[in-house]
Image: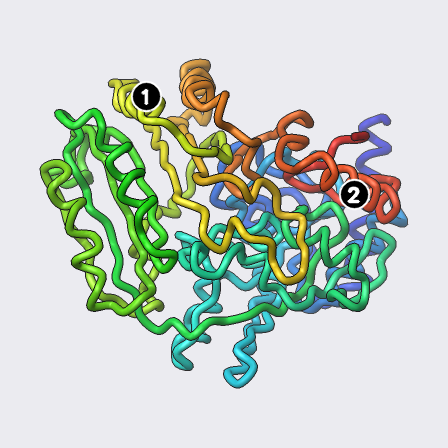
Amino acid sequence: MSENTKVMRAKDVTGALRARTVGPVHTPGDEGHERGRTGIQLMDRHEPDAVVEAATAEDVRAAVTVAAAHGVPVAAQRTGHGHGVGMDEGILVDTRRLSGVRIDPERRTARVEAGATWRDVIEAASPHGLAPLSGSSPDVGVVSYLLGGGLSLLGRRHGYAADHVRSLDLVTPDGKHTRVDERTGPETFWALRGGGSSFGLVTGVEFDLFPVARLYGGGLYLDATDTPDILDLWRRWADDTPEEMTSGVSALRYPDMEGVPDHLRGRPIVQISAAWSGPPERGPALLAPLRSAAPVLMDTLRELPYADSGAVFDDHDDRAGFRGEGLMVRDPGPEALTALLRTVLADRPFMSVVWLRHLGGAMARPPRTPSAVGHRGASHALSALTFTGPDGVDTAGMADLRSEVAGLFADRALGTSSNLSFGPVEAERVRSMYEPATLRRLVELRDRMDPHRRIHTNRPLPPTV
């Protein structure tokens, strides 16, 4: 297609959108276009013909309808945490205006719009003594998190967040707006909960809340200089904890630079994060063994309201360029964990962080209503992140580190993690996110619902099984 043809098509698409939407439509060069196409992830930015700031669910439907009529892709984005393959044409729906949250305290449910973040939900639910199955960062978008499965701070106690979705409002690739649940559209309902966004654009979702008002949690920052077995010590401790305990461990070497606290600067650090949702008074005793594992550089463990749950893992949501390898692992052994610590803490010219999250418990059990979440047999989720410098380039050394980390667990990996893979994901890795039968069902449904591949997604299902 010639450049002139592309320009004319983009003009036609923009005109059609402006005639059908309430929210503003932005074209390249506009401030709104730049804001909408860029998220937390600064690599592989979208380059759509137009960005629609959807003000209503009908705006989302209009965007899908216009995309189908003009033969261009369409996608939705809120925060851009899971950004993968960037668009180079088509329509991007910016959902930030659709952030409504409605709590039903008697039914213990929340109904949210497409652009709500977990912070929006937590703030609305907390006054009722209720909590969602949110993850480590409250600034992640609700919809994308649920479509990927959702690893929650309460996950070992209640399961994957996707398992507790009651219904989803969906604009299908042919422009129809429908609500799906286990009775109406059961196959689509199954697929959306853990199977990703290949089946349309979600405009709203209803899910369960749980009576959790407070946690005992936070982090222990330990000096890992002389404790090579510290990751395995955490693993053995975590395996013996009740299901009310969700924990994770990360290993990194803080850079020797301004802005980093003196007691952490340049040090090899293991950060153990824990969220105990049982009786708060039991928390200190359960976590006491970890305080003697290595010299404690900082201790933030305390009783806190669920509204402050983002402090547990203390994720930083600064905009940055990053790549991430995510794996679902079964029973990591002590040798691999010792090698992992040595690999991660080696001095390198770039910032990296590797973390493990303890799974099991309710996440290992089948949900009441089956969903497409894969690899429930995993005992741990592994994520290896590398961060680019000001030039935004993913160097060979960064890719080598991620590959080396993944290679340590090659014989124990069940597959790739959907929620924890950042950057472009090739078809083979998408295949490994699901068991073969699940993948087959997902691909067959995608082919029926979107035969022309109009829905642009960060985790595109392979063309065939």
Q: Amino acid at mark 2?
A: Arg
Query: Do the CB atoms of the residues marked 1 and 2 lie less than 8 Å apart?
Result: no
Question: Is there any visible trace of residue 30 in the rendered image?
Answer: no
Determine the residue positioned at 45% across, 47% down.
Answer: 360
Is residue 96 toward the left or the right of residue 341 in the image? right
Image: 415 above or below 31: above
Q: Position of residue 427 (x, y in %)?
A: 69, 27
Image: 104 above or below 153: below
Residue in front for this viewpoint, 1 or 258: 258
* Labels in figure, total: 2
Question: Is there any visible trace of residue 214 in the rendered image?
Answer: yes
- The image's colouring method is rainbow
Determine the residue positioned at 78% across, 51% down.
Answer: 14
Image: 441 above or below 392: below
Q: Position of residue 188 (x, y in %)?
A: 77, 55
Q: Position of residue 465 (x, y in %)?
A: 79, 30
Quadrant, the N terminus: top right
Is residue 317 toward the left or the right of residue 170 in the image? left
Q: Secondary structure at mark 2?
A: helix
Determine the residue positioned at 38% across, 26% down.
Answer: 389
Give the class, few, some or many, for how many residues have Cα within 10 Å of label 1's Cα (few <14, many ≥20): few
Q: Amino acid at mark 1?
A: Glu
Determine the residue positioned at 58% across, 40% down.
Answer: 375
The residue that disc 2 covers is 441
In space, the residues marked 1 and 2 are separated at their CA atoms by: 37 Å
Residue in front for this viewpoint, 423 or 73: 423
Give the class, few, some or many, for how many residues have Cα within 10 Å of label 2's Cα (few <14, many ≥20): some
Earlier residue among tags 1 and 2? 1
Q: Secondary structure at mark 1?
A: helix
Observer-side mark, 1 or 2, equals 1
The residue that disc 1 covers is 335
